[in-house]
């Protein structure tokens, strides 16, 4: 199992070695980034008094990953409501966890995002097909107070194997594909970095961190 896992990792390192370095010639002035995974409202089956099953909607906790580029840290912000059956209730902050960035990314990496895809106060929909409950929302906060929003989705299996370069080439947004991976994986890792969690999840996260480092090395000068 260990050999297989590290085999996957080194194959990814090889694939990402093909990512072309970009000359850094701009500063986008990004202050922080919020990553939202759109899964806060779910359907549940419950039995009723007549012996049938009803479908009800539950407003679950919502997790927001905050990348603070000025403090060089990640924050896991958990929001919730007092009554999960009341969909009209507004979320309030329940818990905050802080994770100090340990070279998983450099704040300057996000300056490599092509300017045409991160204009101030715009919303970009990068979904290449209709996705239900699996898309990622990313909001960029700039130093001048403006914001930019992305909506995107990438399949977990498209870049953890031999299909990475082909998927990037076939993507409608090949210049953004590596950034989609970085943002999605940073969100995943920030959730799973917890000493009380299962070791398998922690190990998965460590491998993801290494893959992110490799992507960033190919972009940074």
Image (cartoon, helix red, strand yellow):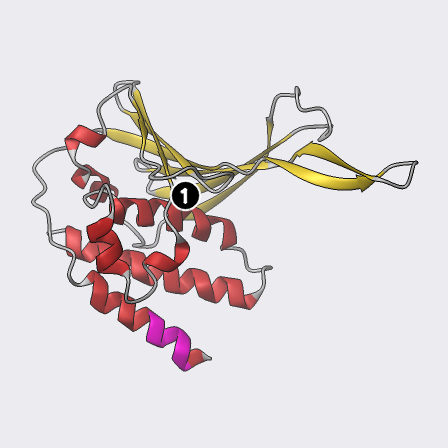
Q: Is residue 140 above or below residue 5?
A: above
Image-based side of 49 in relation to 115, left or right: right
Q: What residue is shown at x 66% (from left), y 21% (from top)?
A: 89
Q: Nearer the viewer, residue 135 or 83?
A: 135
Image x and y of residue 77, in percent: 52, 37
Q: Main secondary structure of the magenta part?
A: helix
Mark 1 neighbour class, 10 Å CA radius: few under 14, some 14 to 19, many 20 or more: many
Splitting the image into 4 quarters, where does residue 47 fall? top right
Residue 106 appears anywhere in the view: no
Q: Residue furthest right?
A: 49
Splitting the image into 4 quarters, where does residue 129 fall? top left
Q: Is residue 39 above or below residue 28?
A: below
Callout 1: SS? strand
Task: Check if residue 7 falls in the magenta segment.
Answer: yes
Q: What residue is shown at x 31% (from left), y 35% (from top)?
A: 126
Task: Check if residue 154 falls in the magenta segment.
Answer: no
Mark 1 — residue?
Answer: 74
Q: Nearer the viewer, residue 6 or 68?
A: 6
Q: Is residue 56 above or below residue 170?
A: above
Q: Is residue 98 above or below residue 58?
A: below
Image-based side of 18 in relation to 124, left or right: left
Q: Which residues are magenta?
A: 3-8
Image x and y of residue 206, in percent: 41, 63
Image x and y of residue 169, in percent: 19, 52
Q: What residue is shown at x 45% (from left), y 39% (from top)?
A: 131
Image x and y of residue 20, in percent: 11, 54
Splitting the image into 4 quarters, where does residue 163 fall? bottom left
């Amino acid at each position: 199992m260990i050999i297989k896992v590290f085999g996957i990792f080194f194959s990814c390192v090889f694939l990402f070695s093909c990512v072309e370095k970009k000359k850094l010639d701009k500063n986008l002035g990004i202050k922080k980034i919020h990553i939202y995974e759109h899964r806060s409202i779910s359907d549940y089956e419950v039995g009723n008094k007549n012996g049938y099953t009803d479908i009800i909607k539950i407003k679950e906790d919502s997790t927001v990953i905050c990348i603070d580029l000025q403090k060089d840290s990640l924050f896991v912000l958990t929001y919730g409501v007092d009554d999960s059956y009341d969909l009209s209730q507004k979320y309030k902050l329940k818990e905050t966890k802080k994770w100090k960035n340990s070279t998983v990314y450099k704040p300057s990496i996000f300056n490599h995002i092509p300017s045409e895809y991160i204009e101030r106060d715009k919303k970009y929909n990068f979904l290449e097909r209709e996705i239900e409950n699996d898309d990622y929302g990313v909001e960029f906060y700039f130093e001048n107070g403006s914001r930019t929003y992305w909506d995107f989705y990438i399949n977990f299996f498209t870049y953890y194997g031999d299909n990475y370069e082909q998927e990037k080439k076939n993507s409608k947004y090949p210049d953004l594909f590596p950034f989609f991976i970085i943002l999605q994986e940073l969100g995943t890792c920030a959730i799973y970095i917890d000493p009380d969690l299962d070791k398998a999840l922690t190990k998965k996260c460590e491998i993801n961190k290494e893959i992110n480092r490799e992507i960033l090395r190919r972009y940074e000068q």
